[in-house]
Amino acid sequence: MSDSFFSRKPEFEIVDMVPEDCPEVSVLHGQRFARPWGDGEFLSLLLQPNVFGFVARQTNALIFKPPMAGFVLAREVAGEAEILTVAVHEKQSRHGLGWRLMQAAIRHAEASGGQEMFLEVDDGNAAAIALYRKLGFEKAGERPAYYEDRKGRKSAALVMKRDLR
C-alpha cells in the first residue's frame, strides 16, 4: 500500500468569520505574533460595522470540527481598507491559504467600495512581503522600531498599499 492511501492533501474552505470563531482566532494569533490579541479584542473588532473577517478550515479532515488553519481580519471605511491582521497556522503553510485569505479580504473590500487597501508588515518577514507583492501591494512608508519580538528586539513596519480600483 502506498503512503498516499493514508494521507490526504488538505483541502480548505474560506468562510466568513463569526463571533464564535474569536477564541480560536485568538489562540492562532498568539502562536504567530509576539503581542497576541485576546478573544475579547477580536470580538470587539468583529462587531464593528465596517470590520469583516474570514477563516480557513480544512474540509477533508477526519475530525468533526478541524482546527482553524488561518484567518484574516480587515476593515473598510470611506474607500480605504486595511488588513488588521492575518495568520496561517505554521503546519498549514505552503497550501496557499495566505493568498486565498487575502484574496477574500480584497474582494470584500472592493465590493464594499474600497478604493485602496493598506497593511503593515514586519520588515523581516520576507515570506509575507513576497506574498503581498504578488498580490499587488507596494511599499508606501515605513515605521522604524514599530514591532517588538518576544526577546525585546525592535524591527520596522513596512506600510504597504494596493489600489483596488
Image (tube, grey):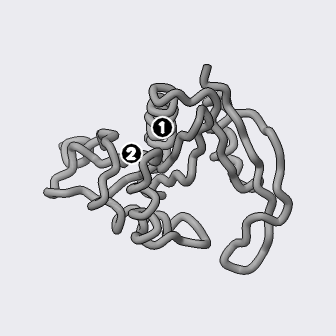
- Give residue 129's quadrant in the image: top right
Q: Residue furthest top?
A: 165
Comparing 151 with 35, the one in front is: 35
Quadrant holding the N terminus? top left
- Give residue 22's quadrant in the image: bottom left
**Figure check: 118 above or below 136:** below
One can see residue 11 in this view: yes
Residue 146 spot, x, y in % from top left: 77, 64
Residue 13 spot, x, y in % from top left: 30, 39
Residue 119 spot, x, y in % from top left: 65, 45
Tag 2: residue type? Phe
* Residue 47, label in figure: none
**Figure check: 52 above or below 21:** above
* Residue 105, label in figure: 1
Residue at 44 percent of width and 34 percent of height: 104
Quadrant holding the C terminus? top right
Q: How many marks?
A: 2
Residue that label 2 marks = 54
Residue at 46 percent of width and 68 percent of height: 41
C-alpha span from label 2 to label 1: 7 Å
Q: Secondary structure at mark 1?
A: helix
One can see residue 2 in this view: no
Lower sequence index among marks 2 and 1: 2
Residue 161 spot, x, y in % from top left: 70, 36
